[in-house]
Image (spheres, rainbow, N blue to C red):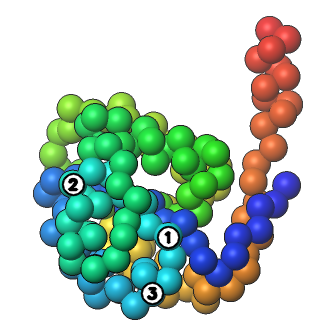
Amino acid sequence: MTESTQARRRIGLVAHDNKKDDLVEWAVFNRHELVQHDLFATGTTGTLLEEHLGVGIVKLQSGPLGGDLQIGGLIADGAIDMLVFFWDPLESQPHDPDVKALLRVAVVWNVPVACNRATADFLVSSPLMTSDYARAVPDYQAHIARLAAG
């Protein structure tokens, strides 16, 4: 199954505390591209991005208060087309299970994920960002049926 997305993407933006400045810097550098899309972010990250980009951002809860899970839910519902998540691999996170769940759900639903600036640069500069794209959406019906039968 495929899900066609139009040239206007719905982008999830998340950053751990030690990576917020990096994400803001990246977003400001790529402002021209980002403002053409619908932006969703967790709490403080969304507020910072809104201030620096000068555009409205759909702000969810702070990550530790459920924002990571909210972004994951939007991905599972097909409401996020791409995730930029600057996570901090050197700092232990009290909500680490939520972080892993967010990354997992993005992979489960075949949503492009950038976890660092280099990958985010590649994604945002891709010609697929501004053209129609039919993302392959996995069909989990057999898996669901197997669980229901067991």
Judge the density around disc 3: few (<14), some (14-19), many (≥20) Cα neighbours within 10 Å: some
Q: Residue at x 80, y 9 (%)?
A: 150
Judge the density around disc 1: few (<14), some (14-19), many (≥20) Cα neighbours within 10 Å: some
Kind of residue indicated by mark 1: Asp
- The CA distance from mark 3 to mark 1 is 11 Å
Give the SS element for disc 3: helix
- The CA distance from mark 2 to mark 1 is 18 Å
Q: Residue at x 69, y 76 (%)?
A: 6
- Mark 2 and mark 1 lie on one chain; the one further toward the N terminus is 1
Would you place residue 79 above or below residue 48 in this image?
above
Q: Position of residue 48 (x, y in %)?
A: 20, 66
Q: State the mark number for residue 139.
A: none
In the visual, does 51 lie left or right of 128? left
Residue at the disc numbered 3 = 33
Residue at the disc numbered 2 = 44
- Mark 3 and mark 1 lie on one chain; the one further toward the N terminus is 3
Residue at the disc numbered 1 = 38
